[in-house]
Image: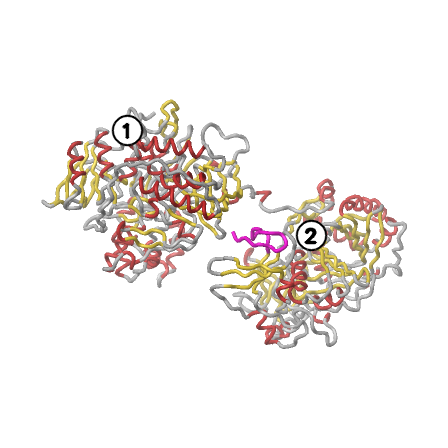
Amino acid sequence: MLRIECPCCGPRDHDEFRYGGDASVRRPAHDDPDPEAWYAYVYVRENPAGLHREFWQHVIGCRQWLVVERDTRNHVVSSVTFARTSQA
Amino acid sequence: MNVQNKRLPGGGRIDRSYPVEFSFDGQKMAGYRGDTLASALLANGATLVGRSFKYHRPRGILSAGPEEPNALVTLGTAGRREPNLPATTLELDDGMVAESQNRWPSLAFDVQSVNGLFAPFLSAGFYYKTFMGPTRRAWKVYEHFIRKAAGLGRAGTEPDPDRYVVRHAFADITIVGGGPAGLSAARAAAAAGARVTLIEQDFLLGGQLLAERSDGTAASWLNQVEAELKSFETVTLMKRTSAFGIYDGDVIGLVEQRDQVGPPRTGEARQTVTMLRARSIVFATGAIERPMVFANNDRPGVMLASAARTYLNRFAVLPGRKIIVTAANDGAWRTAFDCAAAGAEVTVADPRAAPPAALVAEAARLGITVRAATRIVDLHGGRAVRGATLAGPDGQFEAACDLVCMSGGWSPTVHLTSHLGIKPRYREDIDGFVPGAFPANRFGAGAMMGNYAAADAIEDGHRVGVEAASFCGKSAPAPAPSKLDLGETVTTMLRDVPSAQRGKAFVDFQMDVTTKDIELAHREGYESVEHLKRYTTLGMGTDQGKTSNFPALSAMAALRRSTVPETGTTTFRPPFTPVAIGALAGRATGHHFKPFRRTPMHDWHLANGADMLEVGVWMRPWFYNQSGADVNEAYVAEMRNVRQAAGLMDISTLGKIDLQGPDAATFLDRVYANGFAKLQVGRARYGVMLRDDGIVFDDGTTTRLAENRFFMTTSTAKAADVLSRLEFLLDTAWPELRVAVASVSDEWAAMSVAGPKSRAILAAAFSSLDISDEALPHMGAQEGEWKGRALRILRLSYSGERAYEIYVGATAGERLWSHLLEAGRPFDLKPYGVEALGALRVEKGHVAGPEIDGRTTLDDLGLGRMVVGKRSGFVGDVLRRRPALLAPDRQRLVGLECIEDGKRLRGGAILFLPGSKAHGHGRGRITSVTFSPERGRYVGLALLAGDVATEGSEVVAVYPMKAETVRARIVSPVFLDPQGERLHG
């Protein structure tokens, strides 16, 4: 039972969240025509044993998409930020 | 009724004023409140209580706790029947009905015990060698018989009438284990000011102290500490509760048995699962005694030494009169002393050449025969042990006995600490594994750390109790606990190296793994402990090898001529003790398994003969009984009525999303494959969304209500996914777009009026609105009010007929529904269900869930033409052009028409070319079918390889589940009105 400290709602069980995948990959611009860039964004993933930046959405709560830094070895969450501001 | 012939006249922690009756294999027996089923069976002289898993060997009670591998019983009858429960953990209850397992026809005479005679064929790796190698086909022949013969107890097949509950709880500190260490830790932590939850699997607190006399110093220490703990309001004592697993975030899974005093109270849960979250965890889980390994060490009447002492002192049962105690450690001598004091004739066989003089002297005082440098090499007796062959300094000799107490030392219970990856560490001085380094908020105390003596455990517990409280920021002074010295001498141990020259010497009692199996595994190269486990099934029983783990490692280490730490140990995983699935499910069973969503018109549907269908989480009308005798008759009638007059359909389940903002049009233009930027205010458009990988995600319609305001509908199934995806794109990809999205699915009730008479019906229903084709053309939208409630009418068609979608404030849904039916009565307006809805769209060639299945592209679905001109920059546009997705032989949407009279098409049928062998995946599959009143035959939509999908040619549809083969003609998927004239009819 992970617990995620939502910056809007406070600490909540992970049941309230939806996982959104790797947050370290960079989405190409919407009109980027390069297939390689889209291929890398959709399919190419690191599988780190250690810190992992990932998206979670607080679906049963504020509905904000968050960037969570989680250690894949022990599930310790070291930081949680709003995806909007962390992307900027 | 049996007499309790093994019960002593006094002593024990049983309530002699509260006799209890129970039955075992149909035989009535008596016991007392405070007994376990195991102690009551022993009191009644029942030594044979089960048959072993593989060889069906007679087995008795080995232990007095949750480590029990032999005495597994089935409890209860009918829906309450629960198999594989250790009799040693079952609190005796009045009227308890228990049965032995794995025997037929009876416990005393079991047909399959002949398996023992075939033992050479059932050795380790038997199944792999026989059925997985070149002779694999044999498995198909024998599987049925083997499955029937294997397995332990059988679960009930009737619904369980009892209630189970899952709950969450919180504590500063959780202490697992209510023995001397755990009690002392709880006391210290509570005194320091922490909120403490103490977990104990037994129905009494005390752990190993319960094996001491019930009137001695241990008992008074226990009473005092228990009273102290009860005086704290901040201490929760959870007895009858097993900690089955530790999970991420310091969550402990607990399963609590009902307090069985008296009849069940109404609504009371039989078992409660608690997910307990604690800031700090103290493990005081104790230790489990190891059996010794010698020939026929599994005979009924062979018991762990500490268990025998527990039965004697806690339950006042002396399980034997002529006892041999064999042990390589000092602790087990106390069993000999207590049994001798209770009147038994006792012999101690100690493999050590010179056992400590103090022990020998005490033994002499109690009249115990001591045999030094002596081991048991074999046991005699079938259903109960009768005698032993011992080997001493003067050679072998025989001795009669009716009970053998053994102790191969102790194994700290490191299962729970292993669950989160704390690797066990070998401690040489105790010849056992203790937990390795703990993280800052977890602690271990007492026997589980290898500190076996009660005095040490109490001191240890106090220390970690204070530390755990301090971790939680609580550091009020905690007075030292009272001392308790039981005078246990520090155990000196001699490794019991398992060996057997003759007969079977069992290492894992439950899985019937012997020393010979381990030797075989070693010989065949399965030397690593993880391979050993899988090859021999060692430790894979319901007891998780609690008693067998260390002896097996020890045996393998000896064979490899290496040490135990070099050999290593297997990884323990949850659950520590078996947990009933019903307990984990809690209240989420049957109707409560998942939430049911009801539309605002739900009650009307029920009151008007709707047969309801679960569609995802929604309840929707499948068909209405007034339309026909069964679904097949009803949906065709409902379809006909839509095509000829008009039908009313509840579409409230559609996902509805409100989009607002100056960039809303730009946003929609990117998320839909087809363009939305130029959509005019007051107009709606059908749209298809792709995923980033170019596969179709969902379809729906979006209406432009104002320059910067849109109303989107999604499919019922994808409503949540689409909203989340839109939010994802706005939050992460394009935060610069000024758009807000919100679900309004629950705010609107929605219904569709479809059919040639639909315009007339709307005109009659909404006299103040202009429903003319000029005011509300096809794909037009209108907003208004109905009885003071917001109203939206969109002219959209799914069925191919002229149709209107009407949205009204949810609480007015049922009123408007009834109003429309009333206004539509002169026009034959009738409700229709999802079966007719699906049939209407198939006839019209509209794709839906079965076609948009997460594998199909726009081109596959014949929707490629929606992306017009040089349009680009929308989600999925780049990857949809990948060569494999454009291959000419990709399966694409076609229509099929059944061309054999009296036959039908079926969804899921595999398509083959005529004349080709019906084998494998074929060239395509049927996705949706319906009977078409229009065509007078079955038609369907299918995905068929593009290179053979030529209109007019034939395919063969094979449905192996029903052994059906039917010929079909490939046609256009639009079976009805290809010009779309009916939309305006």
> Can you give x and y, in whole percent of width and height, for residue B282 in the image?
42, 46
Q: Earlier in the sequence, mark 2 or mark 1?
A: 1
Relative to residue A18, is residue B606 drawn left or right? right
- Relative height, residue B572 to residue B197 (above, below): below
Residue type at tag 2: Glu
Q: Comparing marks 2 and 1, which lies closer to the viewer?
A: 1
Q: Which mark is residue B6?
A: 1
Which residue is found at the position 47% from the left and 64% from the top? A49
Query: Which residues make up the magenta segment?
Result: A1-17
> Can you give x and y, in whole percent of width and height, for residue B722 in the image?
67, 59
Identify the residue under disc 2.
B835
Chain of the residue where label 2 is placed in the rendered structure: B
Q: Residue furthest top?
A: B17
Say how many tags the image has: 2
Residue type at tag 1: Lys
Pointers 2 and 1 in contact (CB under 8 A)? no
Chain of the residue where label 1 is placed in the rendered structure: B
